[in-house]
Amino acid sequence: MPSGTERHPHAAAVLGAAVPPNGRPSHAYLFHGPAGSGKRAVARAFAAALLSDGLGATEAQAVAARVDHGAHPDLTWVKPKSAAGILVADIDQAVVAAATRTPFEARRRVFIIEAADELNDQAANRLLKTLEEPPSFAHLLLLSNRPGEVLPTIRSRCQDVRFDAPPVEELARFVGTRGVPPETADACARLALGDGERALALALGSGPAMRAASENLARCALRDELAGAPWLALLDPAKATGEAAGASALEGLEDELELVPKKDQKRVKREREEGATRAQRRARTAALDRGLQLVGLWYRDVACVADGAEDLVHHSDRVDALREDATGRSAHRLRAALVHVEDTRASLQLNPNEELALEAMTLRVARVLG
């Protein structure tokens, strides 16, 4: 059984039965679960086990050390290079072509694709043939924090390996190593809903400002104090995040075009610009969704306090404010407000006018709670 699977029963069962020499590994796996759940470490351990097939204990230890340092010739690790995601160029030679060539020294070749949900349509379609007709020695490990966004045709050709969210206490300790006060670290760990990267993002950088803006929006709707358009404090930073992602996706375009034959330059430029537009939209929507999720969690926590279940709140560093908002409130109405927030989050995937969607949501919530 690969190390790191001890607290992931599903992963332990699937991978434990696949480890050589007695196991029969599949040609492709999808490791999925929240960020911080240990997928990356287990992928390394499983890759080392596959590449050690047929070796003695001492040689296997040497292989594991080389895998840990990314120095094994039969291991390829692919991850997004920019906000544009994983492009055809990132996998064409590194995975698709390489998978047809026999291993350099091991019995197998292992390809790990991190953030498989970031494969753009062209890259995903390019990878499909490798997944459909893989050589017997090739094994692909796809990793994703968001398996629902992995192309269905890709996911259907992989064996699922589920990783569970880390406990709140573990996440809080992890966030605390960055100098975050214990009370804040605990709240961010709870609000992250098991996602380690999100817990850190909430505690550091622009995270505290996002928390403050989300709380302000939720409380303004509670009090029907909407004259200042509090939703803009969520929308404006989300737009800025999207613009930064779009600019990042276009970095290096001019240098790339100099290396492309003239007849292909228009196509390459168009594809990069389309990718940048998608990256901008995706980053903006994700940032806005994170803010709205915090708004919904505020109403959920106020309802918990109103029901006498304070120990269940996620905003554990804001209990006094939650108590103030819960005074005289109906938990039933607060849950109805949460439904409006979740409906708006879902609607973001349909490309609405975001400002109007947020304004309409806030008005509906204020009406429900009034």
Image (cartoon, rainbow, N blue to C red):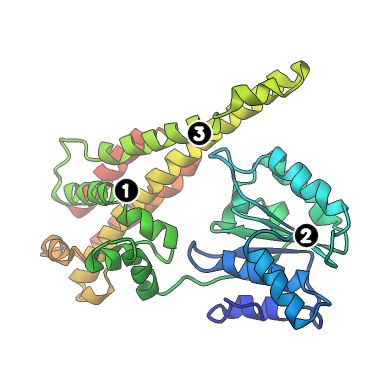
Asked whether 95 or 167 is in front, the reply is 95
Tag of residue 74:
2
Q: Which residue is mark 1?
A: 205
The part of the image, by quadrant, that contains residue 82 is top right
Q: Is residue 8 above or below residue 190?
A: below
Contact check, label 2 and label 1, Cβ < 8 Å? no
Location of residue 303 by image quarter: bottom left
Give how far across and how far down residue 355 sits, in percent: 33, 34
Please indicate, yes or no, whether residue 336 appears anywhere in the rendered image. yes
Q: Could you tell me residue 306's position as x and y percent?
A: 18, 69
* Element marked by disc 2: loop
Label ID, residue 248: 3
Say which residue appears at 40% left-offset and 44% top-offset: 287
In-front residue for pair 74/166: 74
Residue kind at label 1, given as amino acid type: Gly
Look at the numbered disc 3 and give the secondary structure of its residue: helix
**How far apart are labels 3 and 2 at the CA level?**
31 Å
* Res. 53 image quadrant: bottom right
Dot in front, 2 or 1: 2
Q: Is residue 165 above or below residue 143?
A: below
